[in-house]
Amino acid sequence: MRLGEVGLVSGKAGVGKSALLVQLALERLLRQEPVLHVALRYGVQHVRDQYESILEGSLRSMRPLDRAEALLQVERCRIIHAARDGAFSAERLYTLLATLADVVEFRPVLVVIDGWDPQPADIEALRGSRSRNFASWVAFTPVDIAFPLNFPGDVLIEVVPERTHLRLVPHRVREQTGMLPLRLDGAQYVAPAEERTERQIKPEECTLFTGGAAGAEATFGQLAERWGVKEVNFTFRGHVQAHSRGAVPLTEAELAAGDVSLAYVARKLRRSFGENTMLRRVLQSLWHQVSRAEQIFVIGTIQEDGTVTGGTGWGVELARMWNKRLWVFDQEKDAWYLWNGEDWVVGLPTVDATNYCGTGSRNLTEGAIRALESLMERSFGARDSS
């Protein structure tokens, strides 16, 4: 990032442009540099929740007190401005910046604008002399299918989804440097250690991440054992496993790495949870399951607001936020649904990742059990009866 530059992030809806802007902002905020986040499609609380979740994932190795201090630092250095009336322009931004400087002496070094539909003239206005003291990055979805190469930004990047990963394709970079396309992990927005080849995977190459609890998790584990899939069943003190093959106990420190705010979970899922220690640990354990997997399978019920019932709904929210390949078997509709970035669509999944997560309801219908058995058969072939 350089002062005065204008960066453009373009891509289809739901590919992760907003999360990429948050990552750019966090890089500055954790250096105690002021950032203005302009949100044109979401409210302030939605944006704050997104920062909190991405920060929790990025700082999972830190002590809880250090993470709390980082969250406080982000709040101190960031201002979120929600302008959901749809009207926005460079002039409106400059007016906002002048007001913030006069009233609260806030002068950002980075301005991120999410959800704007700019024209080339708008971007040229952002590159004017009044932008010399800050960098601005804009995320938008182009109206036309063709990539908008006519936009005059200093940096122009397209976000392209690839299963559980994202590819950042540079169409223009500062000073014409030779930046190559970069493949990022969809969960953490970092380059993976090695590229995965596209080929048919074998069950013995796969690992199931789950918790072994009665119901969906135990059934996932039992089927993994029948097909020869390795298992990692996270558990913790006081947790009862119905299936314990590959049990991995989590220490208190490891659980804390996956700590989440129950208040945040309640906001995200639009329901309330009591301050229950066991529930908190279950959510912490679920964080470990989802974060380690590339593909997520959940048994539950999709509600009208798009969330999934029960505590496992938190795993669904994590998977959606981290751009995981997510499938939910809706027990009421007796069908599989894929999250496509914007909505749930009916489909028929296979296991196509070497690390996958299976979780869900404690009470399974016969249809759900048949669906899980069929999933394994489609993915790995019929089980050898010998």
Image: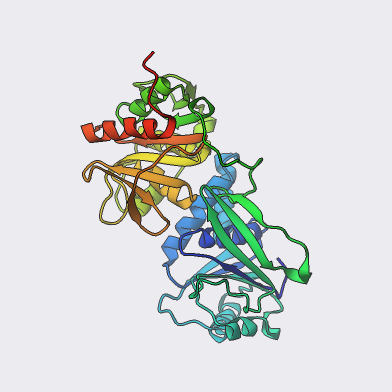
Nearest the eye: 211 or 265: 211
Q: Residue at x 67, y 57 (%)?
A: 181
Q: Is residue 204 left or right of residue 268?
A: right
Residue 29 visible from this viewpoint: no
User: Is residue 174 depicted above or below 278 in this figure?
Assistant: below
Q: Position of residue 210 (x, y in %)?
A: 42, 31
Q: Position of residue 6 (x, y in %)?
A: 66, 74
Q: Position of residue 382 (x, y in %)?
A: 38, 26
Seen as rendered, the residue at the extreme top is: 386
Q: Residue at x 50, y 77 (%)?
A: 117
Quarter of the picture containing the N terminus is bottom right
User: Is residue 91 depicted above or below 3 in this figure?
Assistant: below
Nearest the eye: 178 or 112: 178
Residue 20 visible from this viewpoint: yes
Q: Position of residue 287 (x, y in %)?
A: 46, 39
Q: How is the image coloured?
A: rainbow
Nearest the eye: 100 or 178: 178
User: Is residue 281 depicted above or below 41 in this figure?
Assistant: above
Q: Residue at x 48, y 75 (%)?
A: 143
- Please count the marks in the image: 0
Q: Name the quadrant containing residue 193.
A: top right
Q: Residue at x 51, y 26 (%)?
A: 251
Quarter of the picture containing the C terminus is top left
